[in-house]
Amino acid sequence: MKIDLSNIKNIIFDLGNVLLNLDFDASIKAFQKLGSDGEVLDHKNAYSHPVFYNFEVGKISPAEFRTGIRRILNRPDISDETIDRAWYAMILDIPAKRVKVLQELDKKYNIYLFSNTNQIHIDNLLQEFKAEHGIDFPSLFKGVYYSHEIHDRKPELSSFKKVIELSGVKPEETLFVDDLEKNIIGAEQAGLKTLWLKKEMEMAELF
């Protein structure tokens, strides 16, 4: 099944579990090995601590985030590199077939990215993507909007309004693609057309 893109001029893609494969449990397990007692970083309440939210909206620096993790784990001895490695464990790969689809779509549409993410993840991902695919990841898009840079995150209506304003798109001509229903609802409230990419769906087969 292919998506009907008639009357669409712009497509805004989410990153995680749309373009990028993720394994949230990998970071949970990595932190637990470093000393988590399971209350903050268990499978039910993972990443509920304010330090994760504050890092995602750019309220704290990577150094402050690492300090927060040391407090959560009660491990003041853990190195920056060890924390970054555990935090990045959830990041897997961006398959070549999805990259190819983005490049094909770019010939007909304005392609954007809007992701809830953070500086540590993006800094590492950009390096790995360049090494694997031979191109710069941001070059696939007309505009890239990261939550930690715009200081707002999905599913907040304000975050979608910021992206619409920054990109200059008309919502009625714009398709937003995300894997989380709550983000789809937020996008629809902002007037965007939406595609909820459910678990069994593959982005590269729909466009």
Image: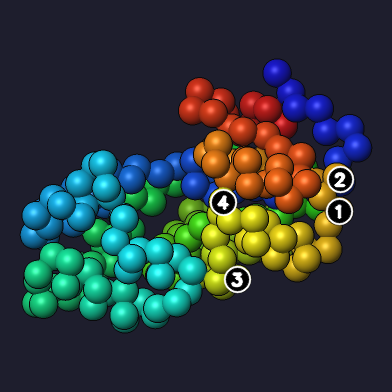
Cβ–Cβ under 8 Å for marks 1 and 2:
yes
Q: CA distance from mark 4 to mark 2?
A: 20 Å
- On screen, 95 above or below 41? above
Q: Comparing marks 4 and 2, which lies closer to the viewer?
A: 4
Identify the element where label 3 is drawn: helix
Percent x, y for residue 117?
48, 60
Q: Nearer the viewer, residue 156 or 175?
A: 156
Camera sees residue 201: yes
Dot 2 corresponds to which residue? 173
Residue type beneath disc 2: Glu
Residue 155: assigned label? 4
Dot 3 corresponds to which residue? 150
Percent x, y for residue 176?
70, 44
Dot 1 corresponds to which residue? 170
Residue type beneath disc 3: Ile
Q: CA distance from mark 3 to mark 1?
A: 19 Å
Q: CA distance from mark 1 to mark 2?
A: 5 Å
Look at 28% across and 50% down and name the residue there.
46
